[in-house]
Image (spheres, coloured by chain):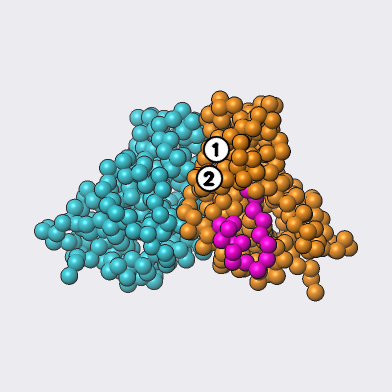
Chain colours: A orange, B cyan
Amino acid sequence: MAAQPIGVFDSGIGGLTVVAALRALLPNESIFYLGDTARVPYGGKSAATVQRYSLEIAEMLLRENAKTVVIACNTASALALPRLEETLPVTVTGVILPGARAAIAQTRSGHIGVIGTRATIASGAYERALRSLDPQVRVTARACPLLVPLIEEGWLESSITDEIILQYLAPLLDDGVDTLVLGCTHYPLLRNAIARLAGDKIALVDSAQNCALAVRDLLGRESLRASESDRGALRVALTDPPDAFLRVAREALQLDVGEVEVRTL
Amino acid sequence: MAAQPIGVFDSGIGGLTVVAALRALLPNESIFYLGDTARVPYGGKSAATVQRYSLEIAEMLLRENAKTVVIACNTASALALPRLEETLPVTVTGVILPGARAAIAQTRSGHIGVIGTRATIASGAYERALRSLDPQVRVTARACPLLVPLIEEGWLESSITDEIILQYLAPLLDDGVDTLVLGCTHYPLLRNAIARLAGDKIALVDSAQNCALAVRDLLGRESLRASESDRGALRVALTDPPDAFLRVAREALQLDVGEVEVRTL
């Protein structure tokens, strides 16, 4: 019998940043990834809609025999994690608490910036997670709805992209944050530009990397780790056929996604 | 019995530009508008998915007793119009043929530019419509995927928006088009900026206005016009609760949309 995969989902392709981090950290684990490209993006949608979509996808991952579910999407983590935890018979890991933990570990001044989609920022999920870890922390959050479309256009290094990043970051930098959470799984693809513009006094926290660490710990605690002799396989399914952005992500992440399946939910 | 409405749909809010044009031209007509905000945008999605969504929405409009269906979305017009025409028992009007007709009437040089979403441009629908009207016409088309997110961010007058528009338009202007089709129902909200940057030698063709004219002609031909004593009502339904962009559109279009209903398809 094939090893049970880790089930990972995102509204689209951005969650492959989490997959890349999981592959590097847990090479023996198999992964089934579902990107909901037929309904992407989630970042401007309501909690009710994002919860409904997340439940549909999680049920599909369970039918694929997933041993645990990873929400590789900040918006779905912000809006649907408690709902999935209540409903699913397996553990669920989002990207927000791991990112918040890493930010608390990084900050010296106790003032943390968070950038994300409209829905993620409006939910206040990062503030809640950060304050649950340290009630004294100061948080400045900002929605950056143009960054995802810029990344999907492939304008990763462009003067226009720099200007937009600066416009979004200026209030956070002026406000004196010393740590910045990249609160959207797309944003690691802009990490170089953001780091250059934020300057070397600002520590960047990448939710993808920290989510992968949390999954490793979880699998250890629950004795769900794959055998060291297993060669982890990656299956990628999308709800709409892949477009040019899959190539952008694949190249930027150097991820071998193999043949992409198309699934209707 | 209430007058039968014109059923209008779009992937989101952008199609309200067509509603505003219909309201101005046909004040006696009632309109039922459905914006599929739970799955917006369509512009990067496949033909199969956009056809499936369009059929689901058209069936809903028929249950609302629509006497004719208007696809107030260039992407859905480009990818799903023939499919809806085959399937529905009422007439269907898209935005592409009316826009193409107006462009052919405008051009002096016979060289027409078209801008739109990735899916609209990739479909080649404007080229086909323009060439069906004039086989000699020259067409230069360009996908502008960042314009919709910029409009939804409300950055209608901004130096960053100007730079992005210029980056997209430069190849068309260099290529010598004398007429530019705004091939996305969002784009009329950027009309001022596009007109300023394209210069006054370029005629802009707004698909919303021309679609409304085509609907008026159709209703006349089919004897479906509302009585002159009718006071047309507008009902707006969305598949996800309204967000900030509805306010942007409402103000830019000075459209009274009343109470917005939320419908799950």
Q: Quadrant of residue A264?
A: bottom right
Q: Are marks 1 and 2 in contact (CB under 8 Å)?
A: yes
- The residue lying at 10 percent from left, 58 percent from top is B229
Residue carrying label 1: A141
Secondary structure under badge 1? strand
A105, above or below B184, in the image: above
Evaluate whether residue B179 shows in this view: no
**In the image, are marks 1 and 2 on the same chain?**
yes
Q: What stretch is highlighted in magenta?
A: A80-96
**Chain ID at mark 2:** A
Place of residue B27 in the rendered image (x, y in percent of width and height, measured from the top left): 19, 52
Q: Which mark is residue A124?
A: 2
- The residue lying at 45 percent from left, 40 percent from top is B153
Q: Earlier in the sequence, mark 1 or mark 2?
A: 2
Q: Quadrant of the C terminus of chain A?
A: bottom right
Query: Looking at this rendering, what residue extends furthest in the left direction?
Result: B229
- The residue lying at 60 percent from left, 49 percent from top is A74
Nearer to the camera, B165 or A77: A77
Query: Looking at this rendering, what residue extends furthest in the bottom direction?
Result: A1
